[in-house]
Every structure is written in structure tokens, then in C-alpha cells.
């Protein structure tokens, strides 16, 4: 698991520039990020995808090509070369930061040649009921990696290593999934569409022993080459849950150390997430998607959200030791596949909730920290320009408060429908207390206990200028403005 007061950053977003400079930027920012209070970085997929130098990384082609071979039209990836990647990791480690690699194991895209086999067609929306008979198909399932020529691994992929594809070059049809003869969709996956094992491209058959062995070899190779401290696992609800315990145990034995692992199981259903984590034991955390959707709903409610319920139905509330909390990510940001935007005005409130409470392992989104501007087509197909503002000044203050004041007992004051707060009383090593108050509606005040008698508190955010003085019993009347957050720290 994470260290008790750690904070990670997702150091990319979907529209990060494809100029090959991100790895160099990571290295330059390493010391500043550590000084700001980050303890780990989740880096984007570092291997070659179908789009070559333009590929975000999730359309994975060759897991062994970290920007070293001429494949898919480029040597480098979107983010740089193998050498730049390894230099970035070295700089992060030198600054005392952990590094988590993005592992995309569910599929391969961009096969080098077609193969002919037989398959049964299904509709994308229904993987339980075939819509035709077993038929001959021509599929891009031969991955020979001619640019790499067997370096690092001689393994080549063929159709028996997959269970399904979505494209038949012989008779192209839209909205199809083709299940290969003798195959079945993996079990222990999400039940959306009847069975959500198939997501995209050539879907790996995890019941194939050669597939499992190759993924283990790759994981060991990756640890040897990069020295990363853990993984972010992509699209795990599409992969048989029984695969990961054995795979992760083997990698930890090989590495001789604990690896931090967080899985992306995109579901707002808390019961489903509990069930998945029960299968994983202590090996894995997952992203707190229900909390993200609470933030999304609150930000769209115009001050009408019941803030007393903001943590209800979340892993942060019910399973905090395995919850990676986040406000936004590359999939939920504007114009992306899982778009569920947390409106900018609410983001400071959301970041205060994940950074200044004791539950969960918070993850800050690159575009929220540095800001982002980009263009893409909206759902109506029309060009759309997006500006995501930087929240760095406030996030940096929250990180400071987290390091120096967010310690010891936590008292909650979730008793007003749009104004909530909590206090942290400090501990022996960090004796100064803190009070946090936020509102999604009108401003106001709340009496809260901080355990420090006759002490002066100031608002670190500078939203409220007048200090607060506690009484003889260690209580104070703390204030916040409407639609805002104030972080009251004990003055020296």
C-alpha cells in the first residue's frame, strides 16, 4: 500500500503534446514536485502504440518498445525515447519520488499481418447471444514486431493467443465482436453487455498459458529495465480477475519488494468494487470512481447538493486503505470517452476533501495542477476548444497543509446540507492543528474543536482575512466564503 501521507500525481492528460518532450519535462520537474509535497508519479504508457508518436498509449502495439525501434512510423513514442524515459525515472528516484508505470494488458492493436480462422459474430452491446453462425474471418492477429526483430523477447502473437476481435478484413461490418472458434469470453469480468471481457482490438485470452507466461516475462523485464515501484493497471474490469493475484505475487517475488498497484475498474457501483477488492486481497487498490461521480454531481448541482452525503457510497468512506481518490483524470476530462467533468469552481473543494483528510491515497491530475488547453470534436462532431484552468496555487497550499497540519485525530462536522468541515488535532511530531470548512452554497461559519486552547488560526488560502481565536476549551468559530474552501492552520 501507499505510505500514510503520500500523494501521487497523474503526470499526463489525454491531450498532452505529442512532441516527445514529456519525459524530459518530468526529469526537470522532479525536485520541484518533491518539494511541493508529491511522493509518487503515475506516468503514461511508455511503449509503442498503433499511433506511433501520436499514440496516448492505450492502443498498445509492442510492450517491449519503449521508444527504441522504428515501428508504427516512429522511433519515439508520444512522450519521448527509451533513454529519455529511463533518465526521467532516474531523476524522479533521485528526488525521492516513487514511479508507477501504466500497464495496458487487456489488448493489442495494429497487427503486422492477417490470419484466417473461424469466429462467431456478436453485437457489441450483447456478448451473450450470437447474431450468426461460425464463419471464416480474416483478422489482424499476427504480431511479429519486425522493427524489434526479437530483441528482448522472441514471442510472436497469433490468433490462438486472443479470444476475440472487432474487425474482419474479409467482410467488414460495424458494431461487431468476433469470438474465435473454441474460445469463450473470459470469466470474472464486468457483466455490462452480458460479458465485458472484450473492449477493443485483439483481446488477450488469459486462459491461454502462453499468454500468461509472456505477460509474466514482460513484467519481470520491465522491472529490470525501469526499476519502477509499482503499476497502474488499465481496464481491469475487462480482464479475468483471477489472473492478477498470481501475476502480482510472481512480480513481487521477482522484484524482492512490495509493489504498489492501483487498478482502473471504472464502475460507480460500490458493491462491485468491494467484490473485486475481496478477490485481490491486499495486493491492489482501485480508483474511487464513486467519489469522482459524487464530485461531478455536486459540481453540477448549483449549490443544491447535500454536502453531508458527499462521501456516501464511496471507497474513501468504506474502504479507505484501498482507495485511490481523484477529482479528474484523462478519461473523464472534457471531450473524452468517460467525460464526467468536475466543474472548475468545485475542484478546490474536491481537492481539499481528498488531500486534507486521512482516508485514501490522493491522486492529483496533471491538467488540474498545470492547466491545459486543447481542441477536439465534441459529441456533435463539431470542433471544440477546451481550457482547463490551473489550480496549482491552492493545491500547493493543500499539500503544505497536508505535510504539516493534517495529522492526528480527525473530527467531522458534516451536519449542514451545504457547509461541511473537519479538524485535525495534530500529533507528537506535528503538534499544530488544522480546521477545514467548505461550502457549495452560501458562506458561513461552524464551531469546531481543534484541541488547542486560546490559539490563533489563519486561513492558509487567504480567502478569509481575519484570524480566528479559539476559546479556553479549544473550540473556534471558523468561516468560509460561498462556493469556496478555507483551510485554517494554527499560527506559530
Image: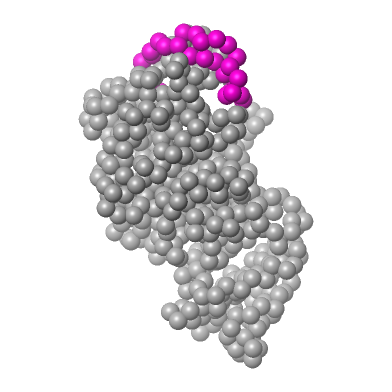
Residue 135 within the segment the image draws in magenta: yes
Give residue 306's quadrant in the image.
bottom right
Q: Quadrant of the N terminus?
A: bottom left
The image's colouring method is one colour
The structure residue drawn at horizontal position 65% and vertical position 32%, both measured from the top left corner, is 379
Is residue 131 found left or right of 227 in the rendered image?
right
**Could you say where residue 4 lies in the image, as x and y percent from the top left?**
44, 65
Q: Is 358 situated above or below 318?
A: below
Asked whether the viewer can see residue 381, the reply is yes
What stretch of residues is rendered in magenta? 109-136
**Could you say where residue 13 lies in the image, as x and y percent from the top left?**
49, 44
**Could you say where residue 110 lies in the image, as x and y percent from the top left?**
40, 23
The structure residue drawn at horizontal position 61% and vertical position 25%, both measured from the top left corner, is 125
Residue sitting nearer the eye, 81 or 241: 241
Asked whether the viewer can see residue 54, the reply is no
Give residue 257's quadrant in the image.
bottom left
Residue sitting nearer the eye, 353 or 203: 203
Amino acid at each position: 500500500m501507499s505510505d500514510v501521507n503520500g500523494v501521487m500525481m497523474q503526470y499526463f492528460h489525454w491531450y498532452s503534446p505529442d512532441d516527445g518532450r514529456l519525459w524530459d519535462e518530468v526529469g526537470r520537474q522532479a525536485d520541484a514536485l518533491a518539494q511541493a509535497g508529491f511522493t509518487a508519479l503515475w506516468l503514461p504508457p511508455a511503449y509503442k502504440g498503433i499511433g506511433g508518436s501520436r499514440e496516448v498509449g492505450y492502443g498498445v502495439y509492442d510492450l517491449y518498445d519503449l521508444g527504441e525501434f522504428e515501428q508504427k512510423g516512429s522511433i519515439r513514442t508520444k512522450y519521448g525515447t527509451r533513454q529519455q524515459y529511463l533518465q526521467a525515472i532516474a531523476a524522479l528516484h533521485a528526488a525521492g519520488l516513487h514511479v508507477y508505470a501504466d500497464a495496458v494488458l487487456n489488448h493489442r492493436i495494429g497487427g503486422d499481418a492477417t490470419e484466417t480462422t473461424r469466429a462467431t459474430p456478436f453485437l457489441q452491446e450483447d456478448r451473450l447471444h450470437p447474431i450468426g453462425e461460425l464463419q471464416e474471418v480474416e483478422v489482424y492477429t499476427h504480431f511479429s514486431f519486425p522493427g524489434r526483430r526479437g530483441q528482448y523477447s522472441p514471442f510472436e502473437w497469433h490468433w490462438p493467443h486472443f479470444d476475440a476481435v472487432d474487425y474482419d478484413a474479409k467482410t467488414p461490418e460495424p458494431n461487431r465482436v468476433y469470438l474465435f472458434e473454441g474460445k469463450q469470453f473470459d470469466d470474472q469480468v464486468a457483466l455490462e453487455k452480458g460479458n465485458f471481457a472484450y473492449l477493443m482490438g485483439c483481446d488477450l485470452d488469459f486462459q491461454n498459458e502462453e499468454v500468461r507466461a509472456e505477460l509474466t516475462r514482460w513484467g519481470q523485464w520491465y522491472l529490470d529495465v525501469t526499476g519502477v515501484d509499482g503499476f497502474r493497471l488499465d481496464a481491469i474490469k475487462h480482464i479475468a480477475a483471477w489472473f492478477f493475484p498470481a501475476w502480482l505475487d510472481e512480480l513481487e517475488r521477482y522484484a524482492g519488494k512490495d509493489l504498489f498497484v492501483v487498478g482502473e475498474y471504472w464502475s460507480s457501483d460500490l458493491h462491485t468494487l468491494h467484490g473485486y477488492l475481496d478477490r485481490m486481497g491486499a495486493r491492489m487498490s482501485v480508483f474511487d470512481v464513486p467519489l469522482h461521480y459524487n464530485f461531478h454531481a455536486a459540481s453540477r448541482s448549483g449549490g443544491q447538493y447535500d454536502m453531508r452525503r458527499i462521501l456516501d457510497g464511496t471507497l474513501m468512506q468504506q474502504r479507505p486503505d484501498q482507495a485511490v481518490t481523484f477529482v479528474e483524470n484523462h478519461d473523464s476530462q472534457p471531450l473524452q470517452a468517460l467525460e464526467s467533468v468536475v466543474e472548475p469552481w468545485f475542484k478546490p473543494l474536491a481537492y481539499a476533501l481528498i488531500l486534507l483528510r486521512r482516508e485514501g491515497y490522493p491522486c492529483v491530475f496533471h491538467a488540474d495542477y498545470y492547466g491545459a488547453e486543447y481542441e477536439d470534436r465534441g459529441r456533435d462532431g463539431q470542433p471544440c476548444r477546451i481550457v482547463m484552468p490551473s489550480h496549482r496555487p491552492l493545491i500547493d497550499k493543500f499539500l503544505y497543509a497536508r505535510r504539516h497540519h493534517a495529522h492526528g485525530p480527525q473530527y467531522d462536522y458534516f451536519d449542514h446540507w451545504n457547509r461541511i468541515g473537519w479538524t485535525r488535532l495534530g500529533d507528537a511530531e506535528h503538534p499544530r492543528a488544522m480546521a477545514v470548512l467548505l461550502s457549495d452554497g452560501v458562506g458561513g461559519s461552524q464551531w469546531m474543536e481543534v484541541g488547542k486552547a486560546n490559539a490563533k488560526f489563519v486561513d492558509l488560502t487567504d480567502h478569509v482575512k481575519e484570524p480566528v481565536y479559539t476559546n479556553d476549551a479549544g473550540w473556534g468559530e471558523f468561516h468560509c466564503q460561498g462556493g469556496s474552501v478555507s483551510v485554517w492552520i494554527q499560527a506559530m
